[in-house]
Image (cartoon, helix red, strand yellow):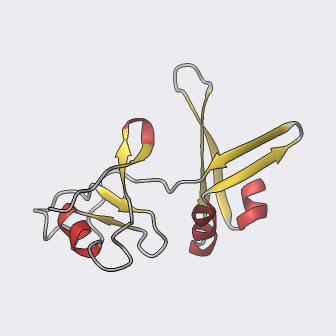
Amino acid sequence: MIMDRLYGGVCYAGIDTDPELKYPKGAGRVAFSNQQSYIAAISARFVQLQHNDIDKRVEVKPYVLDDQMCDECQGTRCGGKFAPFFCANVTCLQYYCEYCWASIHSRAGREFHKPLVKEGGDRPRHVPFRWS
């Protein structure tokens, strides 16, 4: 309800729980029905959740999907391999193979974007990217 009040368009919200312990992991997911709400939420980067006696600052990050093809080349420049990088900057919001990441992100204004990769436990992480 809080995310819908702030950004609108929430069509799903859930709290991640440990499958064995059935206890919250400290993370949740929100899906939006429109791109405008999604971009507003990830652009804010943090949201203050207040409900009764709970007051918590939460980081908002895009969910990085498994097994995605490069949005730029559809696998033609990387031998059909899945794209390891996702650019969460609102000017991109795409998956990239290493070749396309280097090509697209060497352009002025995009050289400081940071790639996200899928990490164990469904958590995206930033990776350092070095130009060859």
Give me the residue at 57% from left, 69% from top. Answer: 39
| Quarter in which the C terminus is drawn | bottom left
Write down the quadrant of residue 17 in the picture.
top right
Where is residue 83? Give x, y as percent: 26, 59
Where is residue 104? Give x, y as percent: 27, 75
From this view, report whether residue 15 is shown above or below residue 77. above
Give me the residue at 31% from left, 51% from top. Answer: 128
Write down the quadrant of residue 130 in the picture.
bottom left
Where is residue 4? Give x, y as percent: 74, 61
> Which residue is the extreme one toward the top?
21
> Which residue is the extreme one toward the left?
79
Front one among 58 and 65:
58
Front one among 33 and 51:
51
Number of residue marks = 0
Q: Is residue 37 visible?
A: yes
Give me the residue at 74% from left, 51% from top. Answer: 48
Write down the quadrant of residue 22 in the picture.
top right
Give me the residue at 70% from left, 46% from top. Answer: 57
Q: Is residue 72 visible?
A: no
**In the rendered view, does 92 fall on the left or right side of 106?**
right
| Quarter in which the N terminus is drawn | bottom right
> Which residue is the extreme one toward the right?
52
**In the rendered view, does 30 fall on the left or right side of 49?**
left
Where is residue 105? Give x, y as percent: 29, 71
